[in-house]
Image: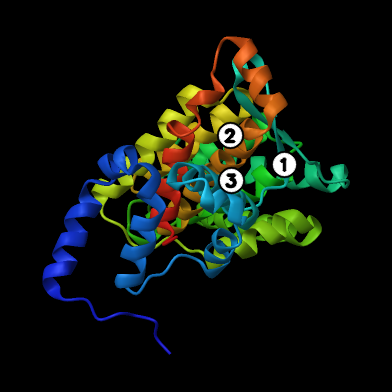
Amino acid sequence: MSSAVSVPDALRQVIAKASDRMVDVLASGGAWRFWAKWYAGAMAGEPLPWGLQKAVALIPEDIWDAGPEAVAEEVARVEDEFWAQALPQAETLVVVADGRFDVRPDPTPDDQRTEKMLGQVEFALDLALRTNSGFNEMCVAFKYLRYTLDDCRDDPNAMEQHFRQARDILRRKLREGEYDPDDALSALVDGLDQHALQLRGSHPEVGAAYEIRVKQRLREVDDATMKLVAGGMRAFQRDRTAGRLYEDTGLDAETVEQDSGIEAKATAIQRTGGRAAQANIIERASQTAKDIDASGGYKAARIGTTGSTLVEMLKSVFGG
């Protein structure tokens, strides 16, 4: 049975206008932001995830009694935890220099198999570059693969995601005629598909993350919203990341900025948004907040700016 609510055309127009001002709403919604989203979703037949609604309903009574600001703070914490758990990564976020975040991989124990896989990808990539198909080093797919081969050899989570990112981008460009058909390029696409499947099968956390993403595919959104999301990703990259996480976030933002296809954009938004939610959770830990403040490079009080705004954009894109 559909849960859609019949909404008058006039009200739909009002909701559409509000959506066009998403950044303003995020900046000024204050203590009532969550409830505005809850109401708009219910009226449009797109309710917030039931798990999230249940978690909010179970907020302790003493917090409800403390007033809307206290409730809003707790709701933000609950939302971050919900999205971090719903969009898992086989990795650990760590605080590094200047209070920024980097990512530490949880490597697969089968290193020999992984190295063989990477060698096959490198060979196929080199062959594809030698073709006259139009594929070259400026393609975002190439950048994902080169970055993986150079910097992510110990990170099965990144390998699986980057292989699928590159595969989806190349498939779309071949399908739409941007690249000419070529056996070597097709072999690269097929190999990436098989290697991503192998990684999901051999690394349970990678497989679990993929299954979650499949269930939360990116909905079609307008160009203006995509630009806002990409801008939020760039802000998160600039203000809160370092090392590998900085590079990952930049590639994800570029994927959203370019005409990379819905599947590739979905993975990019999911990964960076989930990491932003995890960063918010870490920053709320009292000792971590003190360490970040003491670093002088980043203040924990900035939770609620780039990180929370990006998480809000993530939720709006995924319908949550």
| Residue at 80% across, 58% down | 202
> Dot 1 lies on which element?
strand
User: Between disc 2 and disc 3, whose residue precedes?
Assistant: 2
C-alpha span from label 3 to label 1: 15 Å
Q: Of 206 and 115, which appears nearest the observer?
A: 206
In x, y percent, where is residue 116? 79, 45
| Residue at 33% across, 48% down | 259
Q: Is 253 rendered above or below residue 172?
A: above
In x, y percent, where is residue 139? 43, 39
How many marks the image carries: the answer is 3
In x, y percent, where is residue 69? 45, 42
Could you tell me the amino acid type at mark 1?
A: Glu
For label 2, the residue is 146
Residue 162: which numbered mark, if any?
3
User: Between disc 3 and disc 1, whose residue precedes?
Assistant: 1
Q: Is 273 rendered above or below residue 249?
A: below
| Residue at 37% across, 43% down | 229
For label 1, the residue is 91
> Dot 3 lies on which element?
helix
